[in-house]
Image: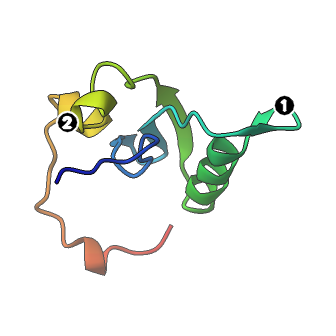
Amino acid sequence: MTTSAYVPVAVNGVLLGRDRYLAPRQWGPVIGGKDVFTEAVDATYRRAGLKVSYIDDHYTYHLGMGEVHCGTNTLRNVSAAWWQLPAR
């Protein structure tokens, strides 16, 4: 049996810089004219000092059980001891 997420998963995006994150568009319920999932993701990443940009990956990756990070050719430097970096 194979299962998948009903909506795109925001944590499966790409960090574009120290203050910018690219996430899959959330497609959540709209209440009061606002997508409540997008509002929650923005608030959460804002607390971490990040501004979120969204990209619609529903047909290109989400339906194929992937998200934004699956379709990128982003090189990542993993040499830093992130657990020792000073808080921002």
Whether 83 is drawn above or below 25: the answer is below
Asked whether the residues under the numbered discs 1 and 2 touch, taking CB atoms below 8 Å apart as contact, a structural biologist would say no
Q: Quadrant of residue 78?
A: bottom left
Residue name at image x 30 percent, y 47 percent: 4
- What element does badge 2 sit on? helix
Q: Position of residue 13 (x, y in %)?
A: 35, 42
- Answer few, some or many: residues within 10 Å of disc 2's Cα (few below 14, many 20 plus, some between 14 and 19): some
Q: In the displayed structure, does residue 4 sit left or right of residue 23?
A: left
For the residue marked with disc 2, what is the amino acid? Cys
Q: Quadrant of residue 43?
A: bottom right
Q: Earlier in the sequence, mark 1 or mark 2?
A: 1
Quarter of the image containing the N terminus? bottom left
Q: Position of residue 75 (x, y in %)?
A: 13, 38
Residue name at image x 20 percent, y 28 percent: 71
Q: State the residue lying farthest toward the right.
A: 32
What residue does disc 1 label? 33
Q: In the displayed structure, does residue 77 sit left or right of residue 13?
A: left
Mark-to-mark CA distance, 1 and 2 = 30 Å
Q: In the displayed structure, does residue 9 sit left or right of residue 32?
A: left
Q: Mark 1 or mark 2: which is in front?
A: 1
- What element does badge 1 sit on? loop
For the residue marked with disc 1, what is the amino acid? Gly
Residue name at image x 54 percent, y 39 percent: 52
Foreground of the two, 25 or 83: 25
Q: Position of residue 86 (x, y in %)?
A: 40, 75
Whether 81 is drawn above or below 46: the answer is below
- Answer few, some or many: residues within 10 Å of disc 1's Cα (few below 14, many 20 plus, some between 14 and 19): few
Q: Position of residue 83 (x, y in %)?
A: 28, 78
What residue does disc 2 label? 70
Whether 71 is drawn above or below 6: the answer is above
Residue name at image x 16 percent, y 46 percent: 76
Q: State the residue lying farthest toward the bottom.
A: 84
